[in-house]
């Protein structure tokens, strides 16, 4: 599908380039500030235990609580977590339906 030329009239590539660069710089700066506030000294160290999500108006849970870590290969070794057993039982390798 060709692009609508009317949508590109206001696009100034140089301005867009600067806006994207500013956005990226601000995002990296915010990430570094969050890491420092959490006492994390390396970008590879945050885990799902560091990330919180509001699940109800008065309840906040970590991603580890919501999406617990699994043993690598557990789905292949038939050690299916209780949460997913029904999905596996209903699954059909021959169809997406």
Image (spheres, rainbow, N blue to C red):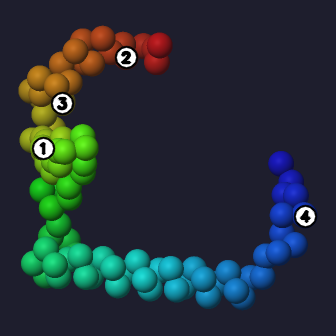
Q: Residue at x 47, y 80 (%)?
A: 24
Residue that label 4 marks: 5
SS for dot 1: helix
Crowding near pointer 3: few (<14 within 10 Å), some, many (20+)? Answer: some
Kindly report which numbered mark, 1 or 4, lies closer to the viewer in this rendering.
1
Check the image and report above or below for 30 versus 95.
below
The residue positioned farthest toward the front in the image shown: 58
Q: Whole-Å distance between the Cαs marked 1 and 2?
A: 30 Å
State which quadrant residue 29 falls in.
bottom left
Residue 89 placement, left or right of 38: right
Q: Earlier in the sequence, mark 4 or mark 3?
A: 4
Q: Earlier in the sequence, mark 3 or mark 2?
A: 3
Residue that label 1 marks: 65
Residue that label 2 marks: 93
Badge 2 vs badge 4, beta-carbon distance below 8 Å = no
Q: Earlier in the sequence, mark 1 or mark 4?
A: 4
**Which numbered dot is residue 28?**
none
Crowding near pointer 2: few (<14 within 10 Å), some, many (20+)? Answer: few
Residue that label 3 marks: 75
């Amino acid at each position: 599908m060709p692009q609508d030329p009317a949508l590109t009239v206001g696009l100034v590539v140089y301005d867009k380039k600067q806006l994207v660069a500013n956005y990226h710089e601000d995002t990296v700066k915010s990430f570094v500030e969050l890491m420092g506030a959490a006492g994390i000294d390396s970008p590879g160290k945050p885990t799902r235990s560091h990330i919180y999500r509001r699940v109800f108006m008065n309840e906040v849970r970590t991603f580890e609580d919501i999406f617990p870590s699994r043993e690598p290969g557990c789905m292949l070794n038939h050690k299916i977590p209780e949460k997913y057993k029904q999905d596996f039982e209903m699954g059909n390798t021959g169809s997406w339906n």
